[in-house]
Image (cartoon, rainbow, N blue to C red):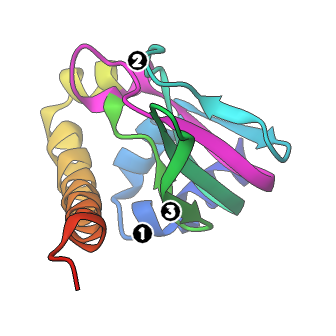
Amino acid sequence: MEGLERIVKEHPFFAGMQNAFCDLVCGCARNVRFEAGQYLFHEGEPADWFYLLRHGRVALQVAVPGRGAVTFQTMAEGEIVGLSWLIPPYRWTYDAKAIGLTRAIAMDAKCLREKCEADHDLGYEMMKRFMPVLIQRLQATRLQILDVYGTPA
């Protein structure tokens, strides 16, 4: 577990986290690997995990009638994939697909939610880390919508 703890502590998302909190978080972590084209999750499925990307890229996609899967964002090394585990009903609202070999740390969402509920200081620390990610992704989506549906030339 020592190697996994080091990897989690060195991931940008957890940078500067108190060791005690990091130890709690690491109890919910495991190494995973996805081959090119493999899905991390599908829209509508239970959001049981989120992922700290270590290597590779992941396309976040939505199904568009008449067009199939459309990538709305691509995540890379050092980023996280998956926010739906935070908010009931804990279901994915999009698909996530590996672009090439992807290595990640999978965080067990139920395990982490239980630890956050038991230790509200940990829960607050996690929210402080997730909210900027959520806001950044909403802003990126907003800009993308403006680009697609903006004023015609």
Compared across the picture, whether 85 is left or right of 81 comes to: left
Give above or below for 97 relative to 117: below
Q: Of marks 3 and 2, which one's residue comes earlier in the chain? A: 3
In the picture of the structure, the residue carrying the numbered disc 2 is: 110
Front residue of this view, candidates 119 and 63? 63
Q: Of marks 1 and 3, which one's residue comes earlier in the chain? A: 1
Viewer-nearest of discs 1 and 3: 3
Mark number displayed over residue 79: 3
Give the residue displayed 40% in from the left and 17% down from the top: 110
Return the residue found at the far front.
153
Percent position of residue 55, x then y: 73, 63
Front residue of this view, candidates 5 and 137? 137
Mark number displayed over residue 140: none
Q: Of marks 2 and 1, which one's residue comes earlier in the chain? A: 1
Give the residue displayed 23% in from the left and 86% down from the top: 153
Q: Are marks 2 and 1 in contact (CB under 8 Å)?
A: no
Span colored in magenta: 85-112
Q: Please tell me whether residue 1 belongs to the stretch shown in magenta.
A: no
Give the residue displayed 52% in from the left and 30% down from the top: 28
Q: Please tell me whether residue 95 belongs to the stretch shown in magenta.
A: yes
Percent position of residue 126, x then y: 26, 46
